[in-house]
């Protein structure tokens, strides 16, 4: 927070508020403009990713701004950022704005950004220290210690009983550690004693103090206490001078794990530590992917529920039909019983409940006991078995057809699940919702607003100059493959794995091996196999791809194809995205 405060001060003091957005109920974005630059300041009160920093990834905004957003626009539009304050090393920043009220008088408004996990909040405070409004209002039923309601005096969160390295010497921290229970792990002891440090920093101090060993305060040697004193002194100097640098820890699979203002060595060769240029870039890189998934998950809950219910219903239906189909496998026995009764009517009398006949269909000619209806004649009993046989045969044909249709529908829903997992903006969700309405899974709702225009497919350029188009969803896959692509273009799709249709635009040229491989990488990256290795990707000319009559969106058949195996490379895909953004 101290480093973020410094970045905001250096870049945006004196900047004016140009626009204010509220993408969702837990996030705000302030567009700040100076005479030479513009910045987007993200304020998040989301429990698992609360933070404040400059961002390049601006979330999509709702069509109608929430009430708090309109209030902030009214009070802070055009206001100048005058100061950024941080009490000690507390996890909150106070942004002071010079604004003009309704009477034209200049006033000092403060935006309190509290970064405290699930208690995070964004609060607007007026010139008299009164709360104007807050992102999360807290009444007496929610908390008896601190109320956050319009009209009340704003009070800082109650301080924790921790030591601030801006105010005390490191020796005071050591004294506090000695006073803790003897069996406390050093990292937990540091976390409970010092203000403004994260668990990863405390673990790193324990790691370097013990040279990789886990330490408890009661077992530490004099040398280890001296090493701890040295590292605490060095960290205190870093904190007081706003030193340090942004470091991010990623797994070997390129997934963000941790971040810090100091180099992290505790993971050894199990992770990769990279240094970023700015702390805002660090937080942007760490949280961007996670927040996108969180936003899409929140906005797509209704679609996930529809798809899950439909998939569960189909799975139960298929299981029941398969069980019934297994029972139909006994139909030949019914026909045999009918034949044996017909061939032996002279041996059977009306009123018998069963009869034992020689089964001449079996080479061993065993005796077969056949149940009879005593109320029926032998001929009627034979016809009863023939009727049951015909019914079972018809049921088998119908069940086989119905199971096949249900399995195809299940495969289609699987593709919708996949495209929903890749949705990145509200427009993607709108198109998926429209697709489900067209297929009858969602009831169409009357709306005066026009449906959003269909988005263009994702576009890339291979390293040797070929255009590559990737469909975003099933409806776009159909449009891209069946209408927009040329017959001589190359069509690619992961083999037996839900994913996007990918078109390598040839424009009359022979596609190079490089272009085919890069298009296959994109097809694999935009499929369910994006986290796998050696993903099979089929490719053929568009002329060999066709859509069966009545097939669901995105479902096609193809012939005369080849298969290439690729391992999706996230860094390569991001590189192609950046190169495409530069071209535009």
Image (tube, grey):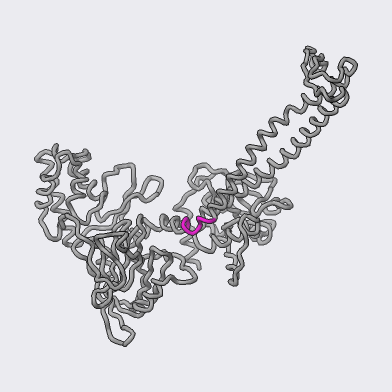
Residue at x-position 15% and y-position 53%: 234
Q: In which quarter of the image is the N terminus?
A: bottom left
Q: How many marks?
A: 0
Residue 365: percent from left, percent from top: 80, 13
Q: Quadrant of residue 385?
A: top right
Residue at x-position 25% and y-position 63%: 146
Q: Quadrant of residue 373?
A: top right
303 sits left or right of 141 in the view: right
442 sits left or right of 296 in the view: right
Q: Which of 180 and 253 is in front in this view?
A: 180
Residue furthest right in the image: 346
Residue at x-position 22% and y-position 65%: 156
Residue 266: percent from left, percent from top: 26, 44
Residue at x-position 66% and y-position 51%: 555
29 sits left or right of 182 in the view: right
Whether 299 is among the magenta residues is: yes
Residue 431: percent from left, percent from top: 58, 61
61 sits left or right of 12 in the view: right
* Image: 106 above or below 10: below
Q: Looking at the image, can residue 491 be seen?
A: yes
Magenta span: chief secondary structure: helix
Q: Which of 360 and 470 is in front in this view?
A: 360
Q: Quadrant of residue 51?
A: bottom left
Q: Nearer the viewer, residue 519 or 458?
A: 458
Whether 184 is among the magenta residues is: no
Q: Which of 285 and 134 is in front in this view?
A: 134
* Image: 388 above or below 347: below
* Image: 94 above or below 237: below
Q: Looking at the image, can residue 546 be seen?
A: no
Q: What stretch is highlighted in magenta?
A: 296-302
Residue furthest bottom in the image: 104
């Amino acid at each position: 927070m101290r480093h973020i405060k410094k970045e905001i001060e250096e870049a945006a003091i004196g900047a004016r508020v140009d626009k204010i957005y509220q993408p969702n109920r837990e996030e705000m974005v302030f567009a700040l403009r100076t005479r030479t630059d513009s910045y987007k300041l993200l304020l998040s009160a989301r429990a698992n990713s609360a933070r404040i920093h400059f961002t390049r990834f601006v979330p999509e905004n709702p069509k109608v701004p929430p009430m708090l957003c309109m209030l902030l626009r009214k009070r802070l539009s055009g206001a100048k950022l005058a100061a950024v304050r941080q009490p000690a090393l507390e996890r909150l920043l106070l942004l002071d704005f010079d604004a003009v009220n309704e009477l034209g008088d200049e006033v000092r408004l403060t935006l309190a950004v509290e970064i405290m996990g699930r208690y995070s909040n964004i609060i607007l405070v007026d010139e008299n220290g009164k709360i104007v409004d807050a992102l999360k209002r807290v009444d007496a039923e929610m908390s008896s210690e601190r109320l956050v309601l319009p009209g009340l005096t704003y009070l800082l969160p109650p301080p924790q009983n921790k030591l601030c390295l801006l105010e005390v010497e490191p020796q005071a921290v050591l004294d506090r550690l000695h006073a803790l229970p003897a069996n406390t792990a050093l990292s937990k002891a540091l976390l409970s004693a010092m203000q403004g440090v994260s668990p990863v920093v405390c673990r790193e101090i324990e790691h370097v103090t013990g040279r990789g060993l886990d330490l408890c305060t009661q077992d530490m040697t004099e040398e280890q206490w001296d090493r701890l004193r040295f590292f605490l002194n060095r960290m205190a100097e870093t904190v007081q001078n706003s030193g340090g640098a942004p470091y991010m820890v990623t797994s070997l699979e390129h997934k963000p794990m941790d971040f810090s203002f100091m180099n992290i060595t505790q993971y050894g060769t199990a992770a990769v530590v990279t240094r970023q240029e700015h702390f805002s870039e660090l937080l942007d890189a760490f949280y961007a992917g996670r927040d996108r998934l969180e936003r899409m998950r929140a906005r797509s809950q209704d679609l996930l529920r529809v798809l899950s219910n439909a998939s569960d219903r189909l799975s139960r239906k298929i299981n029941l039909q398969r069980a019934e189909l297994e029972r139909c496998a006994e139909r030949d026995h019914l026909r045999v019983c009918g034949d044996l009764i017909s061939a032996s009517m002279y041996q059977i009398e009306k009123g018998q409940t069963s009869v034992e006949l020689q089964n001449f269909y079996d080479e061993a000619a065993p005796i077969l006991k056949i149940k009879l209806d005593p109320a029926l004649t032998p001929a009627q009993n034979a016809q009863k078995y023939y009727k049951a046989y015909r019914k079972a045969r018809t049921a088998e044909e119908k069940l086989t057809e119905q199971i096949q249709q249900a399995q195809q529908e299940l495969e289609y829903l699987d593709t919708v699940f996949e495209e929903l997992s890749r949705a990145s903006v509200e427009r993607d969700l709108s198109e998926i919702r429209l697709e489900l309405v067209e297929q009858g899974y969602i009831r169409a709702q009357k709306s005066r607003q026009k449906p959003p225009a269909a988005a263009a497919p994702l576009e890339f350029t291979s390293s040797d100059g070929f255009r590559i188009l990737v469909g975003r969803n099933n409806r776009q896959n159909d449009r891209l493959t069946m209408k927009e692509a040329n017959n001589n273009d190359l069509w690619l799709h992961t083999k037996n794995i839900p994913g996007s249709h990918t078109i390598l635009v040839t424009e009359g040229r022979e596609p190079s091996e490089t272009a085919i491989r890069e298009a296959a990488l994109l097809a694999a990256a935009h499929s369910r196999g994006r986290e796998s290795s050696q993903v099979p990707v089929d490719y053929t000319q568009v002329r060999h791809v066709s859509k069966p009559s009545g097939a669901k969106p995105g479902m096609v058949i193809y012939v005369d194809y080849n298969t290439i195996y690729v391992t999706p490379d996230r860094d390569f895909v991001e590189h192609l995205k950046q190169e495409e953004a530069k071209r535009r």
